[in-house]
Amino acid sequence: MNHFNIAIDGPSGAGKSTIAKALSSKLGISYLDTGALYRAVGLKAYRDGWEENDEIVSRLLGLVDIKVSYDEEGKQHVYLDGEDVSTAIRQDFVSGYGSRFSALPSVRKALLDLQRRVASEYSSVLDGRDIGTSVLPNAKYKIYLTASPEIRAKRRYDELIAKGQTVEFDKVLADINERDFRDMNRAISPLKKADDAVEINSDNMSIEEVIKFVVEMINENV
């Protein structure tokens, strides 16, 4: 199969990363977790006390080094100023910082070239909020993966409980709704379905069913 990219967009908690990783493995192509890049910026902003000021952040980003590499098993690692922050960026509060700072034009511009470079060098699956609309508008395959806020909140709640954390479902749901509003209403590259994307609502679908659907779609359009 020739070089191709799969763009997967959708709201927080829809299962984009899980599906993207599975497709990467099944199809033998690279996976770039674009959300991890924004979380790295969010972690930097938290650690250094950045203000959400685009002009200031633009200057600060010039001093920040963010890199992506893959280990022997193909697992993605994100490095922030030489430090492997792949685990640190998975903290809940870091995700919030990443979402807030991703709304700044300077942040999106700084990370755009990195994402496009990976996609140009390798057949890849990328997931995020604006992959099919902004990052890779010419991607051969575009998916908009979604689910109701309640279903997404329940999945996240169960995940946190399984990790031994004490959380309230209503708080998780409120966070999901707040994140949706912020992502869909930001001025730069808001979350929305690309006109030529295939929408998949996973409310009543298992991970395996979603993967099967996407693989069949790709095989039918090779």
Image: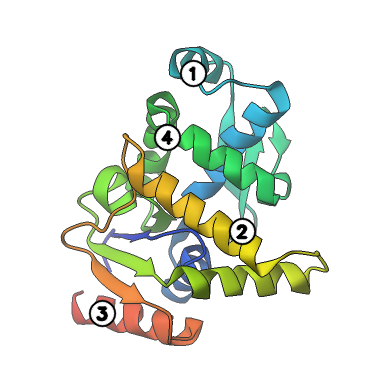
Residue lying farthest to the right in this orientation: 164
Q: Which amino acid, by three-letter code, is at mark 3?
A: Met
- Contact (Cβ within 8 Å) of mark 4 with mark 2: no
- Contact (Cβ within 8 Å) of mark 3 with mark 2: no
The span from disc 4 to disc 1 (Cα, nearest Å) is 11 Å
**Is 111 situated above or below 75?**
above
Query: Which quadrant would the C terminus be assigned to in this image?
Result: bottom left
Q: Residues within 10 Å of mark 4 (few under 14, many from 20)?
A: many
The span from disc 2 to disc 1 (Cα, nearest Å) is 33 Å
Say whether residue 165 is left or right of residue 173.
right
Q: Which amino acid, by three-letter code, is at mark 2?
A: Lys
Q: Dot 1: what SS?
A: loop
Circle 1 is placed at which residue position? 53
- Residue drawn 33% across the image and 83% down it: 213
Q: Residues within 10 Å of mark 1 (few under 14, many from 20)?
A: few
Q: Which amino acid, by three-letter code, is at mark 4?
A: Ala
The span from disc 4 to disc 2 (Cα, nearest Å) is 27 Å
Residue nearest the observer in this picture, 6 or 189: 189
- The location of residue 139, given as percent across then percent down, is 24, 55
